[in-house]
Image (cartoon, helix red, strand yellow):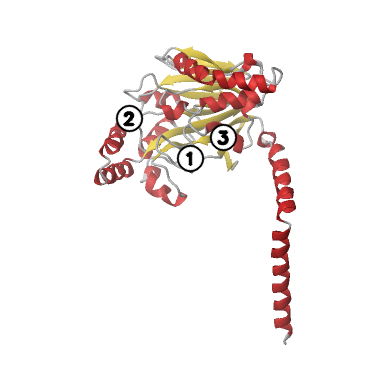
Amino acid sequence: MTKGKRAALWIAAIIIIAVLSAWAFQRPIGMWLFERAVERNVNRDPLAALPDGLHVALCGTGSPLPARERAASCTVVIAGKTIVVVDAGEGAARNISQMGLPNGRIKALFLTHYHSDHIDGIGPMMLLRWTASGNKAPLPVYGPSGVEAVIAGFNAAYALDNGYRTAHHGIEITPPAAAGATAMPFGVPATPTVVYEAGGLRVTAFAVDHRPVQPSVGYRFDYKGRSVVISGDTAPSKSLEAASKGADLLIHEALQLKMVKTLAAQLDKAGRKQTAQIMRDILDYHASPAQAADTARAAGVKMLVLSHVVPSMPSAYLNAAFLDGAKDHFDGPIIVGEDGQYFSLPANSTAIERGSWF
């Protein structure tokens, strides 16, 4: 037998022994792996590496159309050490946790409007903030007229659950006074209006055109010379363009008209007439990637990030088709947002750094 054959046999034998050992000791090895994973995840702190500045994380880039790769609408904004959230669609709080961000440190939630995919994750967000925080008061939720009814509904729906958890864990861990949320309404602004100001962070609300859904607003966040605008759901809006003037980063919703029309046609063929009509109905109160790019160019922003992606792109390979020439409308970077992405804007700088916490 040649040396080469003997070496191959030894390698094969070692592999077989390793596989058999892994199977034989599956339980202790599995426990060891689990313990290491828990240690790593519990001690994970992505905030520790952030410089002072304004930072944005995409905790939900999807829409009402189900997609396993995207949670519904949610954006985290971090100003210094202050964490706030814009919209809380289904899966929002889960994604915030999976990014390693502490739900318990959320200072406020800002709602753009009351479509289900922007509010149906409020319950889990209230719960995780309450049970993991030591907060002494409920989650403040800012929004235009109507937020009172939304929050009253969630508080009522979670009242029994809150009682169970306090009875089980005690008032020190789950104090009843900190459960749920508190509505912080503001009137629909005729002009951009500051609705929150603390710790150097200024939040300005402005009306957008999502008719017949009214009220609908977007938000601008300013902190130490850096600025981020989040459009909410909107067709092209001059108010959004004006509010975005000179912003570093614009996070804009986007609906690809050709793709949605294709989806509607296929639904018609399949006999799903009702859903097909809904696809046609949504075409006139959202913005296309090209229209979002037009707004970014007119406002003079430095970077455009597309969120509330309709339809969802399961692979980045499809992004060029989704953009469909939008890059011809804007000279800056255009990013098709994905859950877990973050954008870091250091204070008093012009840099925009990006990465992923997934």
Q: Earlier in the sequence, mark 3 or mark 2?
A: 3
Instruction: Kindly identify which residue carries mark 3.
Output: 94
User: In the structure shown, which secondary structural element does the residue marked by tag 3 occupy?
Assistant: helix
Q: Earlier in the sequence, mark 2 or mark 1?
A: 1
**Of the residues shown, which amino acid type is indicated by label 2?**
Tyr
Q: Which mark is residue 285?
A: 2
At which x and y percent is residue 191?
Answer: 41, 15
> What number is the disc on residue 263?
none
* Residue 340 location (% of width, % of height): 55, 40
In the shown orientation, is residue 351 left or right of residue 74? right
Query: Could you tell me which quadrant the N terminus lies in?
Result: bottom right
Q: In the rendered image, which quarter contains the C terminus?
A: top right
- The foreground one among 18 and 240 is 18
Work out how far the residue at label 3 is from the one at label 2, CA to CA, in angstroms: 29 Å
Residue 347 x, y percent position in the rendering: 62, 30
Mark 3 neighbour density, 10 Å: few (under 14) some (14–19) many (20 or more):
some
Question: What amino acid is found at the position of numbered circle 1 in the picture?
Answer: Arg
- Asked if one can make out residue 245 in the rendered structure from this viewpoint, the answer is no
Residue at disc 1, secondary structure: loop
- Mark before the other along the chain sequence, 1 or 3: 1
Q: Which of labels 2 and 1 is toward the front? A: 1
Q: In percent of the image, x 57 and y 22: which residue is there?
A: 161
Report, in whole angstroms, how far the alpha carbon at label 2 lies from the one at label 1.
21 Å
What amino acid is at disc 3? Answer: Arg
Q: Is residue 155 above or below residue 304?
A: above
For the point 35% across and 37% down, the residue is: 288
* Residue at numbered disc 1: 70
- Please determine whether, in this image, residue 56 is positioned above or below residue 312: above
